[in-house]
Image: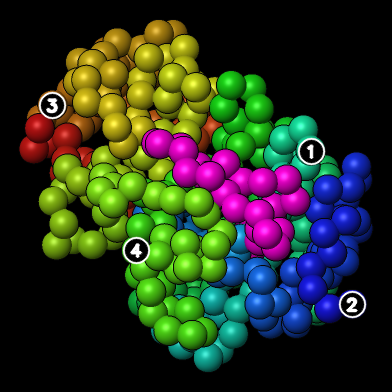
Amino acid sequence: MYGVNNELIIADSFPDKLSDFNFFKDVSAQNPHEEVVPYELISTLFSDYSYKQRWVYIPKNTKANYEENWVFDFPEGSALIKTFYYPVDERDPEAGKNLLETRLLLRKKDGWEAVSYAWNNEQNEAYKKVAGKTINVTWTDFMGEERGVRYRVPNVNQCKECHAADDKITPIGPKARNINKDFEFQDGEFNQLVYWMNRQMIDQYPPELTSPVDWQDEEQDIDDRVRSYLDINCGHCHSPTGNANSTGLYLHLNETRDIHLGIYKKPVATGRGSGGYKYSIVPGKPEESILLHRMISMDPGVMMPESGRALTHEEAVEMVREWIYGL
Protein backbone atom coordinates (compact mmCIF):
# COMPACT_ATOMS: atom_id res chain seq x y z
CA MET A 1 0.00 0.00 0.00
CA TYR A 2 1.31 3.44 -0.90
CA GLY A 3 0.94 6.26 1.60
CA VAL A 4 0.03 6.49 5.25
CA ASN A 5 -2.69 4.21 6.61
CA ASN A 6 -5.13 6.88 7.84
CA GLU A 7 -7.61 4.36 9.17
CA LEU A 8 -5.09 2.90 11.62
CA ILE A 9 -4.29 6.34 13.04
CA ILE A 10 -7.88 6.93 14.13
CA ALA A 11 -8.70 3.30 14.95
CA ASP A 12 -9.78 2.26 18.46
CA SER A 13 -6.71 0.05 18.91
CA PHE A 14 -3.05 0.10 17.92
CA PRO A 15 -1.52 -2.40 15.47
CA ASP A 16 1.22 -4.69 16.73
CA LYS A 17 3.83 -3.45 14.23
CA LEU A 18 5.02 0.07 13.48
CA SER A 19 5.26 -0.72 9.76
CA ASP A 20 1.47 -1.23 9.59
CA PHE A 21 1.00 2.55 9.75
CA ASN A 22 3.08 2.90 6.58
CA PHE A 23 4.72 6.13 7.74
CA PHE A 24 7.96 5.04 6.08
CA LYS A 25 8.86 3.83 2.60
CA ASP A 26 11.68 1.94 4.29
CA VAL A 27 11.00 1.43 7.99
CA SER A 28 14.53 0.25 8.82
CA ALA A 29 16.15 3.23 7.12
CA GLN A 30 13.51 5.56 8.61
CA ASN A 31 12.86 6.91 5.11
CA PRO A 32 9.41 8.54 5.33
CA HIS A 33 6.71 8.91 2.72
CA GLU A 34 6.47 12.35 1.12
CA GLU A 35 3.51 13.36 3.26
CA VAL A 36 5.43 12.56 6.48
CA VAL A 37 7.54 15.65 7.18
CA PRO A 38 10.72 15.66 9.32
CA TYR A 39 11.23 18.43 11.85
CA GLU A 40 13.56 19.49 14.68
CA LEU A 41 13.19 21.45 17.89
CA ILE A 42 15.48 24.34 18.77
CA SER A 43 16.21 22.79 22.17
CA THR A 44 15.43 19.18 22.97
CA LEU A 45 14.47 17.09 25.97
CA PHE A 46 17.26 15.13 27.63
CA SER A 47 16.71 11.37 27.41
CA ASP A 48 19.91 9.71 28.65
CA TYR A 49 21.97 11.18 25.80
CA SER A 50 19.85 9.41 23.19
CA TYR A 51 19.36 10.98 19.77
CA LYS A 52 15.95 11.62 18.24
CA GLN A 53 14.40 11.92 14.83
CA ARG A 54 10.99 13.54 14.52
CA TRP A 55 8.29 13.57 11.88
CA VAL A 56 4.79 15.01 11.62
CA TYR A 57 1.90 13.76 9.53
CA ILE A 58 -1.20 15.86 8.88
CA PRO A 59 -3.97 14.40 6.67
CA LYS A 60 -4.39 15.91 3.22
CA ASN A 61 -6.66 18.98 2.99
CA THR A 62 -6.48 19.64 6.73
CA LYS A 63 -4.35 22.08 8.73
CA ALA A 64 -3.04 22.50 12.26
CA ASN A 65 -4.17 25.71 13.91
CA TYR A 66 -1.76 28.06 15.68
CA GLU A 67 -2.15 28.29 19.46
CA GLU A 68 -0.34 31.04 21.36
CA ASN A 69 2.24 29.63 23.78
CA TRP A 70 1.04 26.12 23.09
CA VAL A 71 1.42 23.31 20.60
CA PHE A 72 -0.42 23.58 17.32
CA ASP A 73 -3.98 22.28 17.43
CA PHE A 74 -3.59 19.33 15.09
CA PRO A 75 -6.60 17.92 13.22
CA GLU A 76 -7.98 14.43 13.74
CA GLY A 77 -5.86 11.85 11.97
CA SER A 78 -2.56 13.63 12.61
CA ALA A 79 0.49 11.77 13.91
CA LEU A 80 3.65 12.85 15.69
CA ILE A 81 6.44 10.29 15.27
CA LYS A 82 9.68 10.22 17.26
CA THR A 83 12.41 7.61 17.02
CA PHE A 84 15.02 7.30 19.77
CA TYR A 85 18.42 5.89 18.91
CA TYR A 86 22.10 5.89 19.78
CA PRO A 87 24.80 6.13 17.14
CA VAL A 88 27.17 3.18 17.18
CA ASP A 89 30.02 5.71 17.37
CA GLU A 90 29.38 9.44 17.84
CA ARG A 91 32.65 10.18 16.04
CA ASP A 92 31.56 8.33 12.90
CA PRO A 93 27.99 8.90 11.64
CA GLU A 94 28.57 6.31 8.90
CA ALA A 95 28.97 3.58 11.55
CA GLY A 96 25.20 3.37 11.84
CA LYS A 97 22.48 3.67 14.45
CA ASN A 98 21.00 1.47 17.13
CA LEU A 99 17.25 2.12 16.92
CA LEU A 100 15.57 1.71 20.32
CA GLU A 101 11.96 2.81 20.10
CA THR A 102 9.54 4.87 18.08
CA ARG A 103 6.92 6.76 20.04
CA LEU A 104 3.69 7.86 18.45
CA LEU A 105 1.16 10.47 19.45
CA LEU A 106 -1.97 9.91 17.40
CA ARG A 107 -4.80 12.44 17.18
CA LYS A 108 -7.97 10.42 17.57
CA LYS A 109 -11.54 11.73 17.50
CA ASP A 110 -11.59 12.43 21.25
CA GLY A 111 -7.99 13.60 21.64
CA TRP A 112 -4.42 12.36 21.63
CA GLU A 113 -3.33 8.81 22.46
CA ALA A 114 0.24 7.60 22.97
CA VAL A 115 1.89 4.30 22.12
CA SER A 116 5.51 3.08 21.95
CA TYR A 117 7.07 0.58 19.57
CA ALA A 118 10.39 -1.09 20.51
CA TRP A 119 12.80 -2.12 17.75
CA ASN A 120 13.87 -5.74 17.39
CA ASN A 121 17.50 -6.87 17.35
CA GLU A 122 17.46 -7.16 13.56
CA GLN A 123 16.47 -3.48 13.35
CA ASN A 124 13.86 -4.21 10.68
CA GLU A 125 10.66 -3.82 12.72
CA ALA A 126 9.35 -2.20 15.89
CA TYR A 127 6.67 -3.87 18.00
CA LYS A 128 4.05 -2.39 20.30
CA LYS A 129 5.05 -2.31 23.98
CA VAL A 130 2.08 -1.27 26.10
CA ALA A 131 3.83 -2.39 29.32
CA GLY A 132 7.17 -0.80 28.39
CA LYS A 133 10.56 -2.43 28.06
CA THR A 134 14.14 -2.07 29.33
CA ILE A 135 16.97 -2.18 26.78
CA ASN A 136 20.64 -2.48 27.72
CA VAL A 137 22.49 -0.37 25.18
CA THR A 138 26.07 0.80 24.65
CA TRP A 139 27.63 3.36 22.33
CA THR A 140 30.98 5.06 21.79
CA ASP A 141 30.95 8.76 22.66
CA PHE A 142 32.81 11.69 21.10
CA MET A 143 35.77 11.06 23.41
CA GLY A 144 36.11 7.45 22.23
CA GLU A 145 34.81 6.04 25.50
CA GLU A 146 32.22 3.28 25.65
CA ARG A 147 29.06 4.39 27.43
CA GLY A 148 26.15 2.29 28.59
CA VAL A 149 22.64 2.75 29.92
CA ARG A 150 19.57 0.72 30.80
CA TYR A 151 17.24 2.54 28.45
CA ARG A 152 13.57 2.40 29.38
CA VAL A 153 10.76 2.31 26.86
CA PRO A 154 7.87 3.89 28.81
CA ASN A 155 4.58 2.20 29.48
CA VAL A 156 1.32 3.99 28.70
CA ASN A 157 0.99 5.50 32.19
CA GLN A 158 4.56 6.83 32.10
CA CYS A 159 3.78 8.60 28.84
CA LYS A 160 1.04 10.45 30.68
CA GLU A 161 3.47 11.65 33.37
CA CYS A 162 4.99 14.12 30.93
CA HIS A 163 2.53 14.32 28.06
CA ALA A 164 -0.36 15.70 30.07
CA ALA A 165 -2.07 19.07 30.45
CA ASP A 166 -5.34 19.55 32.27
CA ASP A 167 -5.34 15.75 32.76
CA LYS A 168 -5.35 15.06 29.01
CA ILE A 169 -2.54 13.66 26.87
CA THR A 170 -0.93 16.35 24.75
CA PRO A 171 2.19 16.85 22.65
CA ILE A 172 5.04 18.87 24.17
CA GLY A 173 7.45 19.90 21.44
CA PRO A 174 5.69 21.26 18.35
CA LYS A 175 4.92 24.74 19.55
CA ALA A 176 5.49 27.40 16.89
CA ARG A 177 8.27 28.95 18.98
CA ASN A 178 10.09 25.61 19.31
CA ILE A 179 10.30 24.90 15.57
CA ASN A 180 11.15 28.45 14.49
CA LYS A 181 14.48 27.42 12.95
CA ASP A 182 16.00 26.45 9.62
CA PHE A 183 16.02 22.79 8.61
CA GLU A 184 17.57 20.98 5.67
CA PHE A 185 14.65 19.31 3.85
CA GLN A 186 15.09 17.13 0.76
CA ASP A 187 14.09 20.06 -1.42
CA GLY A 188 16.30 22.64 0.29
CA GLU A 189 16.89 24.55 3.52
CA PHE A 190 13.92 26.50 4.87
CA ASN A 191 12.57 27.87 8.11
CA GLN A 192 10.31 25.09 9.36
CA LEU A 193 7.34 27.39 9.96
CA VAL A 194 7.65 28.79 6.45
CA TYR A 195 7.92 25.27 5.07
CA TRP A 196 4.85 24.06 6.97
CA MET A 197 2.94 27.12 5.80
CA ASN A 198 3.95 26.61 2.17
CA ARG A 199 2.83 23.00 2.36
CA GLN A 200 -0.47 24.17 3.85
CA MET A 201 0.09 22.11 6.98
CA ILE A 202 -0.66 25.05 9.31
CA ASP A 203 -3.07 27.96 9.10
CA GLN A 204 -0.81 30.75 10.33
CA TYR A 205 1.83 31.83 12.81
CA PRO A 206 2.69 35.27 14.19
CA PRO A 207 5.42 37.29 12.42
CA GLU A 208 7.19 37.86 15.75
CA LEU A 209 7.87 34.92 18.04
CA THR A 210 9.81 34.74 21.28
CA SER A 211 11.65 31.48 20.72
CA PRO A 212 14.05 29.52 22.90
CA VAL A 213 17.71 29.20 22.03
CA ASP A 214 19.72 26.04 21.59
CA TRP A 215 20.90 25.48 25.16
CA GLN A 216 24.07 23.80 23.84
CA ASP A 217 25.14 26.97 22.00
CA GLU A 218 27.69 28.48 24.37
CA GLU A 219 27.69 31.75 22.40
CA GLN A 220 24.17 32.44 23.67
CA ASP A 221 23.48 34.25 26.95
CA ILE A 222 23.53 31.76 29.82
CA ASP A 223 20.18 32.99 31.14
CA ASP A 224 18.58 32.28 27.74
CA ARG A 225 20.28 28.89 27.59
CA VAL A 226 19.10 27.80 31.03
CA ARG A 227 15.57 29.13 30.56
CA SER A 228 15.36 27.28 27.23
CA TYR A 229 16.64 24.07 28.82
CA LEU A 230 14.21 24.27 31.74
CA ASP A 231 11.34 25.10 29.39
CA ILE A 232 11.69 21.99 27.23
CA ASN A 233 12.76 19.63 30.03
CA CYS A 234 10.62 20.83 32.93
CA GLY A 235 8.13 23.44 31.75
CA HIS A 236 5.52 21.00 30.43
CA CYS A 237 4.93 19.71 33.97
CA HIS A 238 5.98 22.80 35.90
CA SER A 239 3.32 25.10 34.47
CA PRO A 240 -0.17 26.19 35.54
CA THR A 241 -1.72 23.40 33.42
CA GLY A 242 0.91 20.67 33.95
CA ASN A 243 1.10 17.76 36.35
CA ALA A 244 3.24 19.82 38.76
CA ASN A 245 0.95 22.85 38.74
CA SER A 246 0.30 22.57 42.49
CA THR A 247 3.99 23.19 43.28
CA GLY A 248 3.88 26.81 42.16
CA LEU A 249 7.27 26.25 40.51
CA TYR A 250 6.73 27.26 36.90
CA LEU A 251 9.66 26.75 34.54
CA HIS A 252 8.07 27.43 31.16
CA LEU A 253 9.61 30.04 28.88
CA ASN A 254 7.05 32.78 29.48
CA GLU A 255 7.25 32.82 33.27
CA THR A 256 8.76 36.10 34.52
CA ARG A 257 7.99 36.09 38.26
CA ASP A 258 11.09 35.28 40.30
CA ILE A 259 9.22 33.39 43.00
CA HIS A 260 7.55 31.07 40.48
CA LEU A 261 10.89 30.52 38.77
CA GLY A 262 12.11 29.17 42.11
CA ILE A 263 14.18 32.06 43.43
CA TYR A 264 13.88 31.93 47.22
CA LYS A 265 10.78 29.77 46.76
CA LYS A 266 10.05 27.28 49.51
CA PRO A 267 8.90 23.83 48.38
CA VAL A 268 5.21 23.06 48.80
CA ALA A 269 6.02 19.69 50.35
CA THR A 270 9.18 19.06 52.32
CA GLY A 271 10.85 15.66 52.55
CA ARG A 272 13.63 13.74 50.87
CA GLY A 273 13.07 15.58 47.61
CA SER A 274 14.23 18.86 49.12
CA GLY A 275 17.48 17.38 50.38
CA GLY A 276 17.06 19.41 53.54
CA TYR A 277 17.43 22.67 51.61
CA LYS A 278 15.06 25.61 52.05
CA TYR A 279 14.58 27.04 48.57
CA SER A 280 14.32 25.86 44.97
CA ILE A 281 16.99 28.36 43.92
CA VAL A 282 19.33 30.30 46.19
CA PRO A 283 21.09 32.93 44.05
CA GLY A 284 24.84 32.52 44.27
CA LYS A 285 24.55 29.20 46.09
CA PRO A 286 23.93 26.29 43.73
CA GLU A 287 24.95 23.83 46.46
CA GLU A 288 21.91 24.97 48.51
CA SER A 289 19.41 24.96 45.62
CA ILE A 290 16.79 22.21 45.51
CA LEU A 291 16.41 22.48 41.73
CA LEU A 292 20.04 21.54 41.12
CA HIS A 293 19.98 18.89 43.86
CA ARG A 294 17.12 17.10 42.10
CA MET A 295 18.77 17.40 38.68
CA ILE A 296 21.88 15.69 40.06
CA SER A 297 20.21 12.96 42.11
CA MET A 298 19.61 9.44 40.79
CA ASP A 299 17.44 8.51 43.79
CA PRO A 300 13.97 7.64 42.40
CA GLY A 301 12.36 9.51 45.31
CA VAL A 302 14.37 12.66 44.70
CA MET A 303 15.38 12.93 41.05
CA MET A 304 13.73 15.16 38.51
CA PRO A 305 12.28 14.27 36.19
CA GLU A 306 10.83 11.35 38.11
CA SER A 307 11.06 9.03 35.10
CA GLY A 308 12.60 9.11 31.66
CA ARG A 309 16.24 9.13 32.69
CA ALA A 310 18.75 6.71 34.16
CA LEU A 311 21.72 9.09 33.91
CA THR A 312 22.51 12.55 35.25
CA HIS A 313 22.77 15.18 32.54
CA GLU A 314 26.25 16.34 33.50
CA GLU A 315 26.55 19.18 30.97
CA ALA A 316 23.20 20.67 31.97
CA VAL A 317 24.04 20.36 35.66
CA GLU A 318 27.24 22.35 35.13
CA MET A 319 25.38 24.99 33.12
CA VAL A 320 22.65 25.41 35.75
CA ARG A 321 25.27 25.46 38.52
CA GLU A 322 27.09 28.31 36.75
CA TRP A 323 23.80 30.14 36.17
CA ILE A 324 22.72 29.95 39.82
CA TYR A 325 26.18 31.01 40.95
CA GLY A 326 25.89 34.13 38.79
CA LEU A 327 22.37 35.15 39.87
Picture coordinates of residue 235 (x, y %)?
41, 34
For the residues marked 2 and 4, what is the alpha-carbon distance in whole angstroms? 34 Å
- The residue mark sitting in front, 1 or 3, is 1
Which amino acid type corresponds to the residue marked 3 in the rendered image?
Pro
For the residues marked 1 and 2, what is the alpha-carbon distance in whole angstroms? 24 Å
Q: Residues within 10 Å of mark 1 (few under 14, many from 20)?
A: few
Q: Is 323 placed left or right of 27 in the picture?
A: left
Q: Where is residue 76, by image quadrant?
A: top right
Q: What residue is pinned by disc 1?
A: 109
Which amino acid type corresponds to the residue marked 4 in the rendered image?
Lys
For the residues marked 1 and 4, what is the alpha-carbon distance in whole angstroms? 31 Å
- The residue mark sitting in front, 3 or 2, is 2
Q: What residue is pinned by disc 4?
A: 181
Q: What residue is pinned by disc 2?
A: 1
Image quarter in which the C terminus is found: top left
Q: Is 162 placed left or right of 207 in the picture?
A: right
Query: Which is more N-terminal, label 4 or label 1?
Result: 1
Is there a contact, CB below 8 Å, between mark 3 and mark 2? no
Tell which of 314 and 80 is nearer to you. Answer: 80
